[in-house]
Amino acid sequence: MVDLIVIGAGLSGMMAAYTAAKAGLNVRVVAKGLGSIHWSAGTIDVLGYLPEAYEGSVKRPFEAMQSFPDTRPEHPYALMGEESVSQALATFVALSKEIGVPYGGANNPGDNLLLPSPAGAARPTYLAPQAQLAGDLSRTEPMVIVGFKGMRDFFPELIAENLNKLGYKARAAFLDVKLISDQRDRNTVQLAHGLDQKEKRIALASALKKIVQPGERIGLPAILGMSHHLTLLAELEEATNSPVFEIPTLPPSVPGVRLFTALREHIRGMGVRVEAGVEVINSQATTANGSPGKVEWIESETSARPWKQKAPKFLLATGGILGGGFDSNIEGRVWEKIFDLPLTVPQKRTEWFEAGFLSQNGHPVFNGGVTVNKDFQPIDSAGKPLFTNLWATGNVLAQYDPIQERSLEGTAVATGIAAGMALSQ
Amino acid sequence: MHTKSWHSVGPSLDECIKCNVCTTYCPVAAVTDKFAGPKYSGPQAQRFREIDQVQTPDHSVDYCSGCRVCNEVCPSGVKIAELNARARAHIMAEEGIPLRNKMLGRNETLGKLGSIVPPLANFGLHNPISRIVAEKVMGIAKDAPLPKWSTSGTFGSWMKKTASQRLKSDKKVVYYHGCATMYYEPFIGKAAVAVFEHNGFEVLVPPQNCCGLPLLSNGEFDEAEKYHQNNINKLLVYAQAGLAIVGTSTSCTLTLKEEAPELLDMDGEDSNALKMATWDIFEWLRELHESGDLKTDFVNMQMVLPYHAPCQYRAHRVGKPALELLTIIPGIDARESHARCCGIAGTYGYKKEKYQIAMDVGQELFDFVHEQEGDVTMTACDSETCRWQLEHGTDLPSRHPIEILAAAYGLYDLENRKLASE
């Protein structure tokens, strides 16, 4: 019998499923489709910007977080406490090594990394896949940013020029190496599969050798192999005698696909069933006067009648506005789609957005969500849990704006693990 | 020609955010250059398709196998496989349907013809010379795993013959056998009847016909519509009486539920009643189990069993009920395949130009079976064409989970594929 149904296969749902399975629960993950991790840069952004420090990015996220109990007492990081967040990220790093997609951070422990974005900006993040670490902009070696002829959405000149403007030494170069047949769509995943083949790996290494200058490090689009990724990275560094790093691309993001695939395989090995194509559309709960109710079942859409799924425990990890966990109508009403949980999102369209697109305060619509207690159980306005057996994690949560803060994956990992632990007790 | 259908699956097109997750998981695009991938052939090319267009863009859509992995992984709910099926039908209407596709689409007619003198039909179809001729003349791949007609009578003839022995009960269920059980694998139907009756259900097998899926996937929508309408005519009265119509062929039940109504725009009350009455057998058995009414007087089966939930099963979006029930049988160590597709995709892999693609797609499944530790003597899968492909690709026998369940009740001989009472 299933002990826990996790709704959503993004990073927080997957981390919660992992944590609960590790604690011995029989877990099923259901998801409408496979998404969010596949769109992410593959990095774990913990805290990149705060409005009070808008001119610069956050240097040491855990130090910045220490003021949260005073400044943002309902922020998920404040609910957990800085130490638990830090422990959760350490758990993620250990797991990443165990499952073959090793992550690392800045040389100075506790610092944010600054990594080149696909637009050539310096992007703060806390943890990055091994292949992105040599892009660390605190390093001094000049960069050669290498693109592939015919690959769309990756522009070495743009990246190099913008990096130069920021004071980092970089130049652009193009390779005319054919990675896949001309008949194929040159999207990042197809190119990465092409580079899993030995002859393509050798061709790339020898082409790079010809353009790299001594002392340079090499930045490439994040397509360096799928199943043979780490092998290829080592081969390229050895052949060119230079550090090699990946720069994330537009979706589908190969580092994201690598992370999701490794996580899914690992939790499947722990007995977790991951079902995609299952869209949860409804739920049924018993309510009790004054005390918390109980979720009896959820229902998902099928080819005919809805599929009623019962379990003792449920975890909501469907994401917010962006992930599809919330819906809205033209009047501006925003609601949580499965349990109709109370939301802090403004219910008037005119109040959703700040005036400027890149407003330093972020947009209220992204800051709103489900309010939870320290155990990540949704609560009512009086602070009491709404249901005894429901938890919520990740981007459905209220009181933080992951876009403005650059905290999307950090909050997902931290709250996923925290809720997984709370519900396993 | 169902040109009106362009626009009913159409709106889902606008949900596409171009994230390419579909292409990332498409098992066909992974192994061939001939298919541009679901995003390109589906939502992308669809922007350039119009009703009454003289020439449809992107003929590579014919290389879509219709496995629906794209629909499964799409985070936005785009009906990519359906867009592709319609585009194929449009191309077929434009260019004419090859004789081969017409033949492969008429599974039921072939079943009936071959069942007149099955040994002769089997010899005629399955000798090496005729397979070479069939490949050269018709384009049917000579090595593709075509089924053999049953030489011990059809399922229908067995039902007639054993009518007096059949259980009578207040609890009744309608069995939808599909063409494969009727003409090629009557033992699947016998196993299903044994399981129904063991659980106290009287089995009704009313007249029925092919679900029309082979016609849909070969682009003959007008003919498919006749088939679906005929099934509505024959089965509606049972649906209206509140009886469950339960099938052992997972692609047939999917077609009755969703594929036919959706692709053919047959969304009327009658079609909907049939849809809502139709169940895949393990979906129905799981309900029975959850309400505590499934008998669990199993014998110990002691076996390592690689199980593949076919893509057509996953397209039901009901989870993996067969796997759930197999795991409650004592002794069964079921190993769940995560392969995307076996490759055959109905009649796709029978076609000369697609045979190798189908084998390459299936490789991850064949590898999964071979990688299993322990004494693997057979595999299990809910779809007939997938079982034939699995046997072809692994050299191991493959069984429908209902055969395994019947055997676990002590009612069925798994090795010789016959009832214990026969």
Image (cartoon, coloured by chain):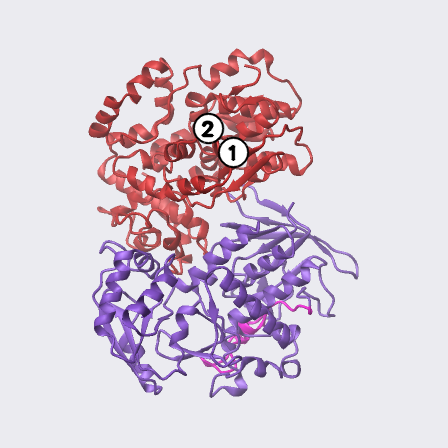
Earlier sequence position, callout 1 versus callout 2: 2
Which of the two residues, A140 or B151, is positioned nearer the viewer here?
A140
Q: Position of residue A88 (x, y in %)?
A: 59, 69
- Viewed as shown, does residue A418 lie left or right of B85? right
- Residue A320 visible, this angle: no
Q: Are marks 1 and 2 on the same chain?
A: yes
- For label 1, the SS is helix
Residue beneath label 1, please?
Answer: B274
Q: Which chain is purple?
A: A
- Viewed as shown, does residue A68 lie left or right of B266? right
Does the magenta run of residues contain A367? Answer: yes
CB under 8 Å between callouts 1 and 2? yes
Q: Colour of chain B?
A: red
Mark carried by residue B231 = 2
- Magenta stretch: helix, strand or loop mostly: loop
Q: CA distance from mark 1 to mark 2?
A: 9 Å
- For label 2, the SS is helix
Q: Is residue B18 above or below residue B37?
A: below
Total residue callouts:
2
